[in-house]
Every structure is written in C-alpha cells, then in structure tokens.
Image (cartoon, rainbow, N blue to C red):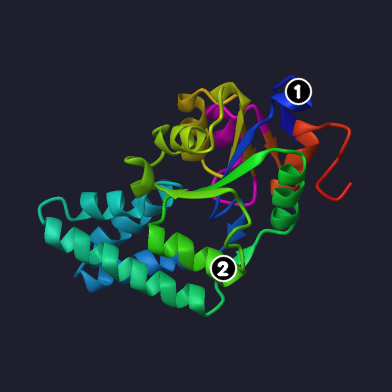
C-alpha cells in the first residue's frame, strides 16, 4: 500500500464516488471483447483493428462512445452503430454472468453507508449498461446514486460525474469527497473536481505507478482496503 495522505477526521468524509468496472466489479475482459465485436461489425479489420483495440486498452475508464467516435471520425452514423453494437454485445455477456463483484465491494459499500458516507457508483458505460450490471448483481439500491457519463454531460477524466454527485446528494464541500478507481482517468476526474482524496485500486486496468502519476493520494490492493485508509483503526472492510 502506498499512502500520501494524512487522514482527515471521520466526520469530514461525506461522499464516496466509486468506479464500477475494475474497482467494484470485474468482467474478465468482457468489455474489451465487446469492443472487438463492435469494431468488426463496423468493418474494421487488419492493422486498423489492432490499432483501435490498443487505443481501447489505453482508454480504460473512458466512455467507449468516445473511442468509436475517434475510430469512425469521418462517419458519425458508423460510430453510433458501433456504440449500439458494443452495448448489445456487452449486455449479452452480462446476462451470461460475465460481471462479478470484486471481493469485499458490497461489504465496503455497506460499511461506508453505515458510517454516514453517501455512495455513488460512477461508470463510463451508458445508462442501460450500468443498470444491467446493477440488476445482474442485485445491486439496485445498494448505493445512494448511480451515474454514467451521459447523466453528467462529460465522462472521465473530466470532473463532471463527481460534481454531479456532489450536487445530487447535497454535499456542502467537495473536499469531503473520496473518489476510488482503477484507472488514471478515475483519479484525474477526482483531482479535477477538487475531491479531498483520490484512491487507486490495483484490481483493474492501471498499475500503481500510473495511478500515482495521475495524482492518487493512496494506492491499495482493492476496494476492501479503502475503509482502512479512511479510518486507519480498521485494517479492512472485514476488520
């Protein structure tokens, strides 16, 4: 665990904005397989396909519609069709059980809420996909709020989702917010929003050095270790 943060008093932690894929849930690479299917369906092949898939991997945490817009820069209709194909393919994978909770995620959310911290799930996927994941896991109502890029206007690394959560949940000071994610984009969004702390987790796309370079105040093995950062007297969500 890397820590570059002096814990604030417990009473100042008011909101936790938690990323989904790679942070609270894992899909075993299903999202990237769905991207591959969508690109192939759009006629992308050969080196162009390899380049697009590499770009997708580098864009972890970002809205996939932005990827398709770049790949099909000269054809907006093709970009939109790719977005629909991605959503359909990924929904099928979700229905097949591809998405599972990160160990300790649900318990961490309950612990946060028990301590008076509001929780928001944030994702770069669309609203329908986010709801499909929450429904598949039985997580509807687990958090106080769920947001996707389209709800806020812009996706990561912009601060919009964090700030939308602050407004929607009536948080008086953005410094009372902690943002948790597995990508540099998650961390950047929290930093740009002015969150008091951005925590990186190592269960997803980026390594510790990448998360630290993006401005993470702490990097921990998983979401289960977040309570131990916020309240050091507890070593984990199960302590």
* Position in image of residue 13 (x %, y %): 69, 29
> Could you tell whether 91 is left or right of 218 in the image?
left
Q: Which residue is mark 2?
A: 99
Relative to 126, is 152 above or below?
above
Quadrant (top left/top right/bottom left/bottom right) for the N terminus: top right
Q: CA distance from mark 1 to mark 2?
A: 33 Å
Identify the image quadrant of residue 64.
bottom left
Image-based side of 213 in relation to 124, left or right: right
Q: Residue 109 at x, y = what percent?
A: 69, 50
Residues in magenta?
202-218
Marks 1/2 in contact by CB < 8 Å: the verdict is: no
Residue sitting at 77 percent across and 47 percent down? 111
Residue at point 56%, 68% (across, down): 99
Label 1's element? loop
Residue bearing mark 1: 7
Label 2 residue SS: loop
| Horizontal side, residue 220 vs residue 124: left or right | right
């Amino acid at each position: 665990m890397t820590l570059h943060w002096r814990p604030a008093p417990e009473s100042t932690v008011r909101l936790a904005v938690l990323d989904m894929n790679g942070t609270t849930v894992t899909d075993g690479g299903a999202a990237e397989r769905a991207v591959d299917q969508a690109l192939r369906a759009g006629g992308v092949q050969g080196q162009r396909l390899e380049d697009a898939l590499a770009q997708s991997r580098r864009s972890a945490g970002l809205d996939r519609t932005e990827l398709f817009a770049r790949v099909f820069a000269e054809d907006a209709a093709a970009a939109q069709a790719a977005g629909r194909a991605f959503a359909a393919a990924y929904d099928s994978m979700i229905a097949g059980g591809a998405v599972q909770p990160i160990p300790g995620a649900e318990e961490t959310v309950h612990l946060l809420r028990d301590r008076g911290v509001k929780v928001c799930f944030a994702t770069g996927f669309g609203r329908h996909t986010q709801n499909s994941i929450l429904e598949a896991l039985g997580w509807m109502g687990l958090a106080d709020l769920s947001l996707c890029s389209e709800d806020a206007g812009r996706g990561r690394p912009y601060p919009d989702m964090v700030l939308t959560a602050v407004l929607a949940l009536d948080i008086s000071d953005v410094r009372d917010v902690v943002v948790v994610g597995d990508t540099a984009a998650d961390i950047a969004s929290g930093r740009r929003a002015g969150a008091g702390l951005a925590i990186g987790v190592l269960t997803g796309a980026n390594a510790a050095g990448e998360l630290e370079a993006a401005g993470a105040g702490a990097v921990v093995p998983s979401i289960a270790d977040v309570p131990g950062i916020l309240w050091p007297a507890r070593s984990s969500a199960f302590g």
